[in-house]
Image: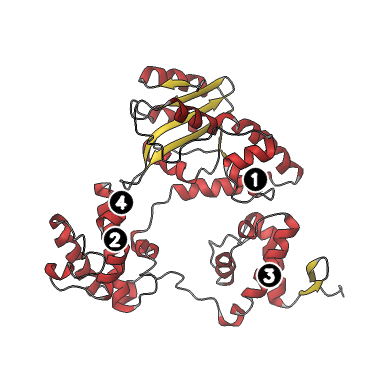
Amino acid sequence: MTTARWIDTPRDLQELVDVLVDEPRVGIDTEFHRERTYWPVCALVQVAWSGGRALIDPLAVDLEPMGEVLRGRTIVMHAAGQDLEVFRRSIGVVPDDLFDTQIAASFLGMSSIGLAPLVKKLLGADLAKGDRLTDWLARPLPDGALAYAEADVVHLFDLHDDLLAGLEARDRVDWVRSECDAMVAKSLVDNDPDTAWWRVKEARRLRGRAAAIAQEVGKWREAHAAEADRPLRSVLPDLALAGVAQRPPKTVDALAKIRGLRDRGIPKAVRGDLMDAIARGQDLDLDLVRFPEATPVPADVRGAVPLLSSWVSQRARELDLDPAVLATRRDLEDFLRDDPDSRLADGWRADALAADIEELLAGRAALSFERGVGLVLRRPPAG
């Protein structure tokens, strides 16, 4: 049984907003679906504040007034990445001060931990169990689903307090703030249509004319899916995208022979558009094709990547971090390519790792192994 207030009228929502804007922090979670759409469909918004909890029904009210709540105070969430997309789509704004408890936990040695395990580990409490297949768009929602949804925000403030204390003890509050800010900033960047084809596993290795066609067809598929609000796979399956790129059909009838389309075909309304996209790919200047990781790691430092990866693992153990939180192989390669957007270029990662990498590359330091310790960074004596 839920104790949260159910909000399904504009008046009730405005009354709630009037209360929340006076709060220094608000806990929020969302439930959404996107199995049959391109854009996430917000189905429920759970809110916690110092005086209570509420469940907002976005099927009954416009969430736009919640924009005032998302700005000007700390918004506590767990694994907020997809929720930020929901906010941007449904409300039009995203938090300007986000504290993500999953990110915070990763800086205390608990990488990618779910909400329920985190609550159990830090607070000793068990969250209400729910059905992962709940249809959150159904009305009325059963009591069990409501209780499960409310549970997602019940412990957010206690987690915030506990995690913040741990971060302050390790002087890592700024690290987490930087990561949360980066997540928010990323949520405001639109996908580059010229790189949509990179997400198709079967197409990533294409080169030459096939890559040009994949780029144009991927761009068309993304735009059409967004406009029609349909999943990408329902517009054109990944396998079919790679197929038309490798063996571009010359006629509409030939589309039916493409692997991935043989059993399902493609709607008449878009066949011409797809053929036009294929034609654009066939005419595209190959210099305009965008490839993943177009700039290679310089040959003189490429061999250092395995060595540096080992040092990342060692530093992560010393800092009690998951190595992927500190730096991925891609991060190392971006840094070695002098990519100005490399995560190692500035911020806490530069302080924790980049200086060591530069010294190793310059020969001013070396790695040795000590039993019981692991890798040790050694610098020659001064003078």
- Read off the residue under disc 1: 105
Distance CA(mark 4)–CA(mark 3): 40 Å
- Of labels 2 and 1, earlier in sequence is 1
- Residue 292, how many percent across, how many down? 43, 69
Element on which disc 3 rests: helix
- Residue 74, how many percent across, how many down? 57, 34
Q: Viewer-nearest of labels 4 and 3?
A: 4
Distance CA(mark 2)–CA(mark 3): 39 Å
Q: Are marks 4 and 1 in contact (CB under 8 Å)?
A: no
Query: The disc labelled 3 sits on which kind of residue?
Result: Ser
- Of labels 4 and 3, earlier in sequence is 4
Disc ID at residue 231: 4
- Of labels 2 and 3, earlier in sequence is 2
Query: The disc labelled 1 sits on which kind of residue?
Result: Ala
Q: Are marks 2 and 1 in contact (CB under 8 Å)?
A: no
Disc ID at residue 310: 3
